Image (tube, grey):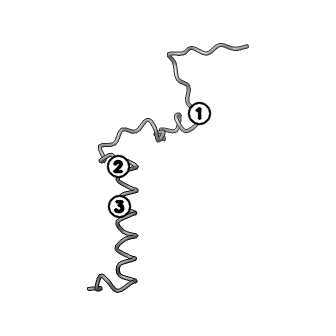
């Protein structure tokens, strides 16, 4: 069995071509939590239901 060094990472052809791996890229984008996504979806569903039942007038 071949043992690989734990400190050295090996990359496939994408690494040799200069293509950055997705998880190696650091972004400064805002982080969105799952709770925020669910909250926005629930609010949109409520607004759509209110418009469909005629409670909330359309602009």
Residue position marked by numbered label 1 in the rendering: 12
- Image quadrant where one finds the N terminus: top right
State the residue at coordinates (47%, 41%).
22
* Disc nearer the start of the sequence (2/1): 1
State the residue at coordinates (40%, 56%).
38
The circle drawn on residue 40 is 3
Neighbourhood count class around disc 1 (C-alpha, 10 Å): few under 14, some 14–19, many 20 upward: few
Q: Residue furthest left?
A: 59
1 or 3: mark nearer the eye: 3
Front residue of 53 and 45: 53
2 or 1: mark nearer the eye: 2
Give the percent coordinates (x, y) of residue 48: 38, 76
Neighbourhood count class around disc 3 (C-alpha, 10 Å): few under 14, some 14–19, many 20 upward: few
The circle drawn on residue 43 is none
The answer to whether 57 appears left or right of 8 in the picture is: left
Q: Tags 2 and 1 in contact by the CB under 8 Å rule?
A: no
Residue position marked by numbered label 2 in the rendering: 32
Mark 3–mark 2 distance (CA, rounded to whole Å): 11 Å
* Disc nearer the start of the sequence (1/3): 1
Give the percent coordinates (x, y) of residue 56: 29, 82
Numbered disc total? 3
Q: Tags 1 and 3 in contact by the CB under 8 Å rule?
A: no
Vertical position of residue 20 compared to residue 38: above or below: above
3 or 2: mark nearer the eye: 3
User: Is disc 3 placed on a helix, strand or loop?
Assistant: helix
State the residue at coordinates (26%, 85%).
59
Vertical position of residue 30 compared to residue 12: above or below: below
Q: Residue furthest right?
A: 1
Front residue of 36 and 53: 53
């Amino acid at each position: 069995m071949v043992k690989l060094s734990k400190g050295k990472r090996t990359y496939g052809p994408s690494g040799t071509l200069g293509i950055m791996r997705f998880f190696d890229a650091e972004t400064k984008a805002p982080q969105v939590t799952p709770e925020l996504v669910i909250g926005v979806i629930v609010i949109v569903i409520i607004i759509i239901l209110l418009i469909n039942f005629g409670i909330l007038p359309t602009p």
